[in-house]
């Protein structure tokens, strides 16, 4: 029986898939294309979808996950029957946003949070 991957390993594997299969490279994720927290917003949509599918009181999240999706809806690929997959996609997008922030000028970063 194969060893089950940890959450961090699943996220790293998904991030590699996003880069290799989808083409969402560091250059694509740069400030040139994503300047308004779109990557983090996309991660939040997967988290909303997860919450909405796992808690009866969280129907709001499920009903509005699509509303906040920052890109063309064809790129939103929820997996409501697989909560681990939802969180893995969210985690990989968060990792991409962290990487993007680490690449930008520190003065620019300060301006983002002020």
Image (spheres, rainbow, N blue to C red):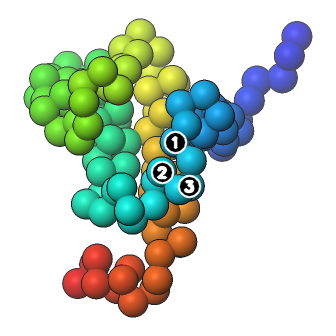
Q: State whether residue 97 appears in this view.
A: yes
Q: Provide the residue designation for mark 2.
A: 28
Q: Provide the residue designation for mark 3.
A: 26
Which residue is depicted at the point 35% across and 32% down?
A: 46
For the residues labelled 2 and 3, the Cα–Cα distance comes to: 5 Å
- Image position, residue 37 (x, y; %): 30, 58
Which residue is depicted at the point 30% across and 63% down?
A: 35
Asked which secondary structure carries label 3, the reply is: loop
Q: State whether residue 88 appears in this view.
A: no
Check the image and report above or below for 102 versus 54: below
Are circles 2 and 3 on residues that touch, CB within 8 Å? yes
Are circles 2 and 1 on residues that touch, CB within 8 Å? yes
Q: Provide the residue designation for mark 1.
A: 24
- Image position, residue 33 (x, y; %): 36, 55
Asked which secondary structure carries label 2, the reply is: loop
Snapshot quadrant of residue 34: bottom left
Q: Nearer the viewer, residue 36 or 114?
A: 36
Check the image and report above or below for 86 versus 36: above
Are circles 3 and 1 on residues that touch, CB within 8 Å? no
């Amino acid at each position: 029986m194969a060893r089950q991957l940890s959450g961090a390993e699943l996220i790293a594997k998904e991030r590699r898939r996003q880069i290799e299969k989808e083409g969402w490279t560091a250059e694509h994720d740069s400030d040139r294309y994503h300047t308004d927290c779109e990557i983090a917003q996309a991660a939040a949509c997967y988290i909303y979808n997860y919450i909405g599918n796992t808690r009866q009181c969280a129907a709001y999240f499920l009903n509005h996950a699509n509303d906040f999706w920052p890109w063309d809806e064809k790129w939103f690929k929820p997996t409501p029957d697989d909560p681990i997959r939802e969180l893995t996609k969210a985690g990989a997008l968060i990792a991409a946003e962290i990487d993007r922030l680490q690449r930008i000028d520190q003065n620019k970063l300060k301006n983002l949070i002020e």
